[in-house]
Amino acid sequence: MCTRIYLEGKNTHTKPDLHLNPDLSDLPPIQLFGVEGRYACALYSAASKLKQLDVVEKDLIKFQGILKTDLRLQEFIRNPILKRSLKVTAVKEIAAKVPLSVPSTNLLALLAENGRLKAVNTIINSFKTIMAAHRGEVVCEVTTAKGFDHLGCVTVIKVQIMGFGM
């Protein structure tokens, strides 16, 4: 059994002194690695500079929901036969119809252009992880042998976790 608990607490991540180098203010609060992490971090930086972090997050969640329900869109994204230029044009048209913000549209177009559109779900999940860290959320996953019988167990676990100095 696995239960995910979201806690609000102090983010213990120490940020660099922004007064010494103001360009560091657009850095993500956590560093993610891999191709997905690089795209998510770049999107965070771009959206932060434009002051559109929340808008981009809502756009990506909306697009991820559409992607889960629209089978034709899933097939289109996974189709390796289609030319990248065709995918870029189609993704821009989809973004205009939804509608999506400029940074979100640019991300999808860049993914299509670079042949990385298949990774859009993991990139969106990586961006959501960065945004959770930005808000100071801490995700705690508790694995138990038996399921919780009542809500009191979850409350006890939250109290115990909060005792770790969050």
Image (cartoon, rainbow, N blue to C red):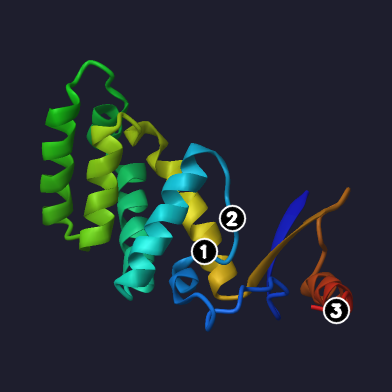
Percent of width and height locating residue 5: 70, 66
Percent of width and height locating residue 107: 29, 49
Q: Nearer the viewer, residue 69 or 36?
A: 36
Q: Residue at x 17, y 57 (%)?
A: 98
Q: Say which label, 3 or 2, has the lower sequence index.
A: 2
Q: Nearer the viewer, residue 22 or 159?
A: 22
* The quarter of the displayed image where residue 7 is located: bottom right
Left/right of residue 86 with respect to residue 2 in the rendered view: left
Query: Mark 3 and 1 residues: CB-CB less than 8 Å, in contact?
Result: no
Residue type highlighted by circle 2: Gln
Left/right of residue 123 with respect to residue 139 in the rendered view: left
Front of the two marks 3 and 2? 2
Residue furthest bottom as drawn:
19
Q: Residues within 10 Å of mark 3 (few under 14, many from 20)?
A: few
User: Marks 3/2: CA distance?
Assistant: 22 Å
Query: Mark 1 and 2 residues: CB-CB less than 8 Å, in contact?
Result: yes
Mark number, residue 28: 1
Q: Residue at x 54, y 79 (%)?
A: 20
Which residue is disc 3 drawn over?
A: 165
Left/right of residue 102 with respect to residue 148 in the rendered view: left
Residue type highlighted by circle 3: Gly
Percent of width and height locating residue 76: 23, 29
Left/right of residue 52 with respect to residue 161 in the rendered view: left
Residue type highlighted by circle 1: Pro
Mark number, residue 31: 2
User: Marks 1/2: CA distance?
Assistant: 7 Å
Secondary structure type for disc 1: loop
